[in-house]
Amino acid sequence: MTATMQTGAGDAKATTKDYPGRAAVISWIFFDWAAQPYFTLITTFVFAPYFASFVAPDAASGQALWGFATAAAGLAIALLSPVLGAIADASGRRKPWIAGFGALLVIGSSAMWIGKPGNPDIIPMLLLAYAIASVGVEFATVFNNAMMPTLVPPDRIGRLSGTGWATGYVGGILSLVLVLGFLAANAETGRTLFGFTPLFGLDPVMHEGDRITGPLTGLWFIIFVTPMFLFTPDYPAKRPLREALGEGLRELRESLSSLPRQKSLARFLLANMIYTDGLVSLFAFGGIYAAGTFGWDTIRIGTFGIILAVAGTFGGWIGGKLDDAFGPKRVITGSLVILLFAIVVILTVNKDSILFIPVAPPVPGGALFAGAAERAYIVLGCLIGATGAPLQAASRSLLIRLAPKDRIAQYFGLFALTGKVTSFIGPLLIGAITAATASQKAGMAVLVAFFVAGLALLAKVRE
């Protein structure tokens, strides 16, 4: 008995030595830092609200158009992600895929500079650039996630995932501070949040501080993803791309046919499909919804984003520790319950009421977030930020625990598929209902169903 334990301990030590050093792990974590400004600046707090408020004819049609573009990108990601993941597993390497799709992110986001205010002719090209960038960042994330099992032992996967999300949120905070404090100015005062005139002579009237978030996102990604390419080891190449194509597709067919026999994994993928759709839609339209409900400008929405990102940073870090201590399923369940509560209460918040109780509306030209309803929205947003990060981190941790280790990129492709195959439905429903009712609140109400259904399916998953 003692000899066996000693041998096991020796094996564990030998296995531990097979994992790369701290520099490799930290460099991998910086992918989240590099990619997060796309979600923070473009899809949530700066560019999306700017598009709805100043490029589109009105906020409701802007929310609808943004929803349709998000849906189109999500459909493309859903169809291709498992196929590309299977090919990557068969070929072995991950970094070339990250580089290729990272280039799409850089090109698409940089092109969003063209979105001048009050120019409806540019809307189709602008939305195309947004869709290209979205496809790039999501596919790059699929292959980056697939590197996780080679970086740390299984009992530290939750902490690695949570630390990655928390680090990404810090990157999002700093990018928002940079934009709001030095680049994006109020069109009336010509001053940034810190009271400066915008750097580089950016014109507040033409909203160049809002539009610069596209090129800034591309440059930020190039700079901070570089350590991962330099210091994080890749999988060794297994076979040429053409051979990997056939082998990958064969393995994908086998995996899909075996899913009915892997009931917990299948249920988790289905649950992830539903609650991720709700979460992505909530983040995508949260800033647009605030702009329409409270009339917030870029500085207010961006400040709101910084507050949420701080909450997300702590949520991701704490969630990673809870994941290793109690398991990812419990972290996901708790996050979904809090998210459901927050979105239900948000639907009762108006400029002059909370939970249908009248409150004093904000005074025009008053202090930042002076209205009671605005402060309530911020508190609820903090709940969403603090639980959204551990929800996503624990989800990829749970997948690693459930999926076959030799097909991890393929299953992360399926993970992305389930996160995207219906991801067009949430934005599409929000866009369609908003367009039909001319009510942002009616469009957002559909998210309640997504979180309830996700919770019900997750309850049947066994780790």
Image (spheres, grey):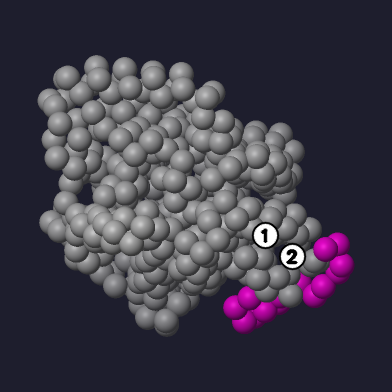
> Which is more toward the observer, 373 or 152?
152
Give the magenta part as a residue range: 355-371
Q: Name the residue at 87% across, 67% down.
A: 357
Looking at the rendered image, the quarter that the N terminus falls into is bottom left
Crowd band around label 1 with a 10 angstrom C-alpha radius: few (<14), some (14–19), many (20+): some
Q: CA distance from mark 2 to mark 1?
A: 23 Å
Q: Which residue has dot 2 on it?
A: 351
- Image height of 355 relative to 97, above or below: below
- Image height of 451 relative to 325, above or below: above
Residue 68 drawn at (x, y percent): 53, 34
Q: Name the residue at 63% across, 53% down.
A: 333
Judge whether residue 231 can be spotted in this image.
yes
Q: Which residue has dot 1 on it?
A: 338
Residue 412 drawn at (x, y percent): 39, 38
> Which is more toward the observer, 225 or 336?
336
Question: Relative to 391, is 185 on the left or the right?
Answer: left
